[in-house]
Amino acid sequence: MGNNELLSRIVSYTSGINFNDIYRLRVPLDAMHRELVKLESLKIYFSEDTKCSIEGIRASIIQLVGENALDIVVIDYLQLMHVEEKTNTKNDEMTKITTGLKELTRRLKIPIIALAQLNRAGADEPKLENLRDSGSIEQDADGVIFLHGDREGSDRKAIVAKNRNGKLGNVALKFIGEQMKFEETEVYTPINNDTF
């Protein structure tokens, strides 16, 4: 997804303006300008580098944090990353990537959210073992949340499958496609009340 589409989604989410109207430039320029001015105060930096290495991301993040231009990192998606040094398997490479991200979040004290592909088929609820390419994703993550539901409908569920500092459970969500956002439709349902 390119920078323009990401920015269009953020504007739609924050303003409530229909995403398709923004994306197809059917929003008056003054209204769009007002929304973009509001976003200027946020510390958002996009990179369209699809061949990014953990070493390159580390350097970019350290620089942006040093410039006080970054509060959170979102990586879309983990399996597109690589390491500069040769590894024997994709598993070994993913371990170096997740370990590098874990060290970076500890060092800089900023959250890193890494989206990941699943290795599964069918409509079953995803589980931790479905994380693709490595058990290190599950091991190094402080939390894992799966988004599950029928792509055609608006009903979804956020499944908190790992939460190092809290409970596991599910949250019923409704996807509002016109504004690129999710809203809770039910209260958080713990999977096991003893888990904490």
Image: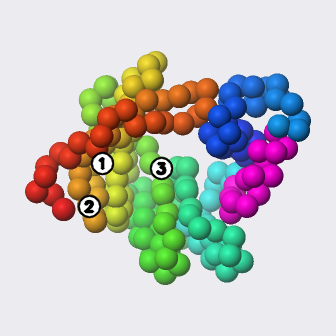
**Residue bearing the label numbered 1:** 160
Left or right side of 20 for 124: left
Marks 3 & 1, CB-CB < 8 Å contact: no
Please, what secondary structure does the residue beneath circle 2 have? loop
Asked if residue 61 lies in the magenta stretch, the reply is: no
Residue position marked by numbered label 3 in the rendering = 115
Camera-side residue of 152 and 57:
152
Magenta-colored span: 32-47
As drawn, is 83 to the left or to the right of 142? Answer: right
> Residue 149, position in %: x, y?
37, 28
- In the rendered image, residue 41, in percent from the top left (x then y), is placed at 73, 61
Give the label, 3 or 2, closer to the camera.
Answer: 2
The reply to whether discs 2 and 1 touch (Cβ–Cβ < 8 Å) is yes
- Magenta stretch: residue 44 in it? yes
Q: Residue furthest left?
A: 194
Q: Residues within 10 Å of mark 3 (few under 14, many from 20)?
A: some
- Going from the N terminus, do you reach mark 3 or mark 2 first? 3
For the point 53% across and 28% down, the residue is 176
Q: Can residue 111 be seen at all in this image of the molecule?
A: yes
Relative height, residue 123 to residue 10 (above, below): above
